[in-house]
Amino acid sequence: MQTLALLGATGSIGEQTLDVISRHPERYRLFAVTANTRWQPLAEICLRHRPAVAVMADPVAADALRNHLRDAGSDTEVLAGEDSLEQVAAEADTTVAAIVGAAGVRPTLAAVKAGKRVLLANKEALVVTGQLFMDAVARHEATLLPVDSEHSAIFQCLPGGDDPLAGVKKLCLTASGGPFRTFSAEQLGAVTAAQAVRHPNWDMGPKISVDSATLMNKGLELIEASWLFGLPGERIDVVVHPQSVVHSMVEYLDGSVLAQLGTPDMKTPIAVALAWPERIASGAQALDFTRMGELSFEAPDVQRFPCLALARQALEAGGTATAVLNAANEEAVAAFLEGRIGFMEIAELVNRALESVLAPRCRNIDDVMDIDRAARRYVAACLSSRDE
């Protein structure tokens, strides 16, 4: 019986994690759930799954949740604030890090420093902190398991053993291409937020859906893969695969290529990480090879989708350039979702931040988060001057 802390329980990954663990009550006990401000859906989760603790990042939302659960007769304890997020992340046997964005960095690191089993769906933790994060994993002997479908696929295709990269030539991440894969540059200039959040294959939240549409999500995954698997960017390829059946591949020195296939359902990689090294039922639909149809692959177009090239550029630059990239992108995507900027302006703002914000190599998480805030201030200033 594993106790679980589910960080970001009200998001897409959180909901699907709850679906998987509910199928295996003999294996998993939900210890803690967290959310930012959405206390109503967290209240429903608490009443249905009865965790010992619920944490709201926002104190006002925590008060509303506490009152609601008390009136409903629930005995779930309600806590508030970032310190409480870090506390529950460090107390469970397994922490599912599913908070979107840089907000998930500190609680994810708290679980790592407690030497826990960490299921990483928050790619920004690695994108922002990089070597600091991986050093903490090694120093505290935490177990780090990827939840992103692409990294889970690579994890499953690697040889394992004492040398996890034995015979590996390169990795290949697959990308669906998002909803605008066939759009011209002119068409991309007119797309709306409502169009961008409708992913053709995957059930994801609005921010990640927009990242998928710009290919920034694949850029962030490229950076994450470099840190997770210890390979430089030049040994990690990206290929567009619209059907989202092949989730990623590993090429070996002898010419062999191992690929992991499955339906586009996040419950599969969640189940892989939860049960590793065992296998459990996830609830995902099995592939039917007789009805699958064509599997196609093409090179990504970094002219129409420059965010992928910007991510590779930031990885090669080193220091905290990837933290600048992530922070600028989060602010730009938020502005796009609010209707303040156009789709193509997301990449423009990220590029300007990379050119303008200093990104030195930092020695601790506080320094990294200072860089994160500097990048956000820069983008905010750009948006403010644009709105005048």
Image: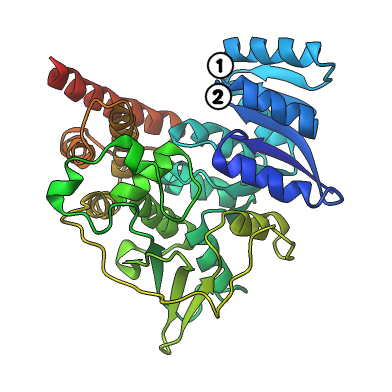
Q: Residue at the bottom extreme?
A: 254
Q: Is residue 167 above or below residue 264?
A: below
Q: Is residue 85 above or below residue 360?
A: above
| SS state under label 2 | loop
The answer to whether any part of residue 116 appears in the image is: no
- Across and down, in percent, residue 341 comes to 21, 30
Amino acid type assigned to the residue bearing label 2 in the image:
Asn
- Across and down, in percent, residue 126 comes to 45, 46
| Label 1: few (<14), some (14–19) or many (≥20) C-alpha neighbours in 10 Å | some
Q: How is the image coloured?
A: rainbow
Amino acid type assigned to the residue bearing label 1 in the image:
Asp
> Label 2, on which residue?
36
> Label 1, on which residue?
58
Is 13 placed left or right of 361 in the picture?
Answer: right
- Across and down, in percent, residue 85 comes to 62, 27
Label 2 with label 1: CB-CB less than 8 Å = yes
Q: Give the distance between the C-alpha atoms of the residues marked 2 and 1, in whole angstroms.
A: 6 Å
Residue at x-position 27% and y-position 37%: 192
Residue at x-position 40% and y-position 29%: 369
| Label 2: few (<14), some (14–19) or many (≥20) C-alpha neighbours in 10 Å | many
Quarter of the image for residue 170 reads bottom left
Q: How many marks?
A: 2
Between 35 and 200, the residue placed more toward the observer is 200
**Rendered-image quadrant of the C terminus:** top left
| SS state under label 1 | loop
Q: Which mark is residue 79?
A: none
Residue at x-position 34% and y-position 29%: 334
Earlier-in-chain disc, 2 versus 1: 2
The answer to whether any part of residue 223 appears in the image is: yes
Between 34 and 362, the residue placed more toward the observer is 34
Q: Is residue 175 above or below residue 77?
A: below
- Across and down, in percent, residue 288 comes to 58, 74
